[in-house]
Amino acid sequence: MTDAAGHPVSPVPSGDALVMLAGAMLSVIGFATFLLLPPFIEVVATRLGYSESQLGVLSALIMSGQTLASLASSQWVRRAGWRRAATLSLAGLLLANLASIPVRGFAAFCVLQCLGGFCGGSLYSLSLTVLSDCRRPDRGFAYAVGAQTLYQVFTFFAGPVLAAHGGVVAFLGLFAALCIGGFVLVRWLPAHGRDRAPAVAAGGLLTAPAVLALAGCFLFYVNVNAYWTYIERIGTAAGLGVSAVSNSLAFSNAASLGGVALAAWLGFRRGLLLPIAVSAVAVVGSVLLLLGPVPLSAFLVSAVLYGNAWNLSITYQYGTVHAVDRTRRGVALAPAFHNAGGAAGPALAALFVSERNHDSVIWLVTASVLASLACFALGLALRARSRPA
């Protein structure tokens, strides 16, 4: 069997543990900077002296690179050789991080990290496509989420040590070392994906319910990356030690697996909107705990609540996009809208945040998650109204 370009096709066999492991680990490497963003932003601020607004711009550019990669990958991921694409993405990400080590200027550092975001985003999209070609993609995605969470737990605990003994160089060295390890995983990937002709469905993608659902994805990640960029800064500004903040975030990431488990157990038995609404309320409650004086106990409760709400909501967001889009192509675009929102969140926060006062971040998180909920609710309502009897 060959694909449209005449390449031999190597479908992912069912139960191929090595392929699933490679896909899951490559997803960690591609998303490594974002997954470790709070301590990375903190060490960049303290060692390179960037302002709060500059930190927001840096985070936005990293996510912009991820967004562009997600959009571009839809054009090549089914045509390119997977091993070659993974190798090129890893090489680009490795070079971007190594080249960033001696850089101190803000503009040059941003350009290199945006390039790294693009290469990492390409690798991330490829890894998800590898897992989607498995006969049990649900299991493959679960491995990826688990691997990403474990990476966060270990690196958040190690973050203070890296910051104290190596600063920015230690974090960039970690990202580079992951890329070197990734080259070992490439050989476990299939040469090419399955031959899947694009489905042609009646009607266009841009129906009102689909647009609203994708807008909900965008707005939700405005909240996520505004929070994720500044959460460690919020903790340290409140007088909490760097180690206490990192350990709290590490614990919250481990505890956030409860949100994934709840979604897996609940399924769609309670519909799509109710879990999204519960998650939105939990997000608002978690960030309101950060107003005023923030003791360590409140910070920890806030982080755990937010992490579980985040993980719970994502499952139902993809389900909503799939439900309201008759062409079944909207789910492929949802990560791009998530990443675009992730770029917009810190950029908007950077317009208002100050070094000692992060209340504007909390209000931006609150407004964007509630606006996201409204978009999902309206999209599902319009879809229900237009459904034939």
Image (cartoon, grey):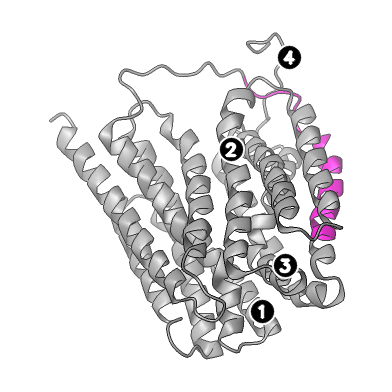
Q: Main secondary structure of the magenta part?
A: helix
Q: Label 1 to label 2, Cα distance in Å?
A: 33 Å
For the C terminus, the quadrant is top left
Q: Label 3 to label 1, Cα distance in Å?
A: 19 Å
Label 4 element class: loop
Residue 80 in picture, x, y percent from top left: 70, 22
Residue type, numbered disc 4: Pro
Which mark identifies residue 247? 1
Query: In the picture provided, is 17 more to the left or to the right than 353?
Result: right
For the N terminus, the quadrant is top right
Residue 119 in picture, x, y percent from top left: 71, 40
Q: Are marks 2 and 3 in contact (CB under 8 Å)?
A: no
Which residue bears the numbered disc 4?
Answer: 8
Q: Quadrant of residue 9?
A: top right
User: Comparing marks 4 and 1, which lies closer to the viewer?
Assistant: 1
Residue 324 in picture, x, y percent from top left: 31, 36
Residue located 50% across and 46% down the image: 340
In front here: 157 or 56? 56
Which residue bears the numbered disc 2?
Answer: 68
Q: Label 4 to label 2, Cα distance in Å?
A: 28 Å
User: Comparing marks 1 and 2, which lies closer to the viewer?
Assistant: 2
Q: Are marks 4 and 3 in contact (CB under 8 Å)?
A: no
In front here: 214 or 45? 45
Among the two numbered marks 2 and 3 on one chain, the one whose residue lies closer to the N terminus: 3
Label 2 element class: helix
In front here: 224 or 108? 108
Residue type, numbered disc 1: Asn
Among the two numbered marks 4 and 3 on one chain, the one whose residue lies closer to the N terminus: 4
Residue 274 in picture, x, y percent from top left: 29, 58
Which mark identifies residue 44? 3
